[in-house]
Amino acid sequence: MPLTDEPAAVMNPARAKRLTVELQSKLLTYRLQNWRQVAAPNLTLDHFTTPTRELALSLATCIVGDDELRSQVFPLLEGHDRQIKLDRTSLLEALVLESLLAACHDSRSDTLPIGLITQSVNTILAGRGEALRVSPEVVGWKLRGLGMRTEFMADGRKGLVLLGETRVKIHALAVAYGVRTLQKAPSNLRCAHCSSVTI
């Protein structure tokens, strides 16, 4: 619709009802004529976050017979996706992942106590001027929410064992949450797992 400064006309109930009947029949006709042609486009949308990717596919799938119009959907969602990424980087989960990512790049240990993760998250918060401080219990719940399984270590404390599979998962989640340090790390400081994920 063209942009206008004019106020929208108020529609009376009778006209609204007539338009509803007319549009519903047109939409149903369109659906019946094109339902066999509706298919998800064969496109790579890896640079989008999962919510934006799902939205892009839903919108593009509805456009039938016009590849040019379909391709115009994706640039329109760039701003929406940037906002999602920005929101995610400030989430506590992103800070926990940032801490885990740093531990992945530190080869001194393959076990990571929750207390150490908590200390690291609080250091990140303080470094960014945040007054919030988190407890080991909060970090433990965030780890569980991210699908990270903690277990009791030799000294009786709970922690995370950094197996290869766990490191891969941390890197994939760090990308999904837009973790800042993964985006800004120089290529020569990245590990084998960093090079296997798309930033």
Image: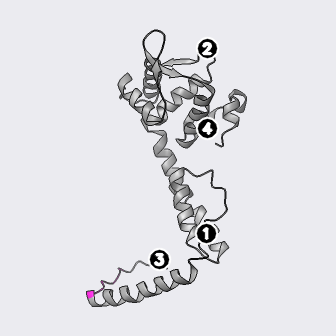
Q: Which residue is mark 3?
A: 3
Report if residue 8 lies within the magenta region.
Answer: yes
Does label 3 or label 2 sit earlier along the sequence? 3
Which secondary structure lies at badge 4?
Answer: helix
Q: Amino acid at mark 4?
A: Gln
Are the residues at dot 3 and dot 4 in contact (C-beta closer than 8 Å)? no
Q: Which residue is mark 4?
A: 183
Of tags 1 and 2, which is closer to the observer? 1
Q: Amino acid at mark 1?
A: Ala
Residue 135 visible somewhere in the drawing: no
Q: CA distance from mark 3 to mark 4?
A: 38 Å
The tally of labels here is 4
Q: CA distance from mark 3 to mark 2?
A: 60 Å
Q: Which residue is mark 2?
A: 108
Residue segment shown in magenta: 7-13
Give percent across and percent down for residue 137.
Answer: 36, 25
Give percent across and percent down for residue 27.
Answer: 47, 82
Give percent across and percent down for residue 32.
Answer: 52, 82
Of tags 2 and 4, which is closer to the observer? 2
Q: Which residue is mark 1?
A: 39
Q: Which quadrant of the figure has residue 122?
A: top left
Q: CA distance from mark 2 to mark 4?
A: 23 Å
Give percent across and percent down for residue 44.
Answer: 66, 56
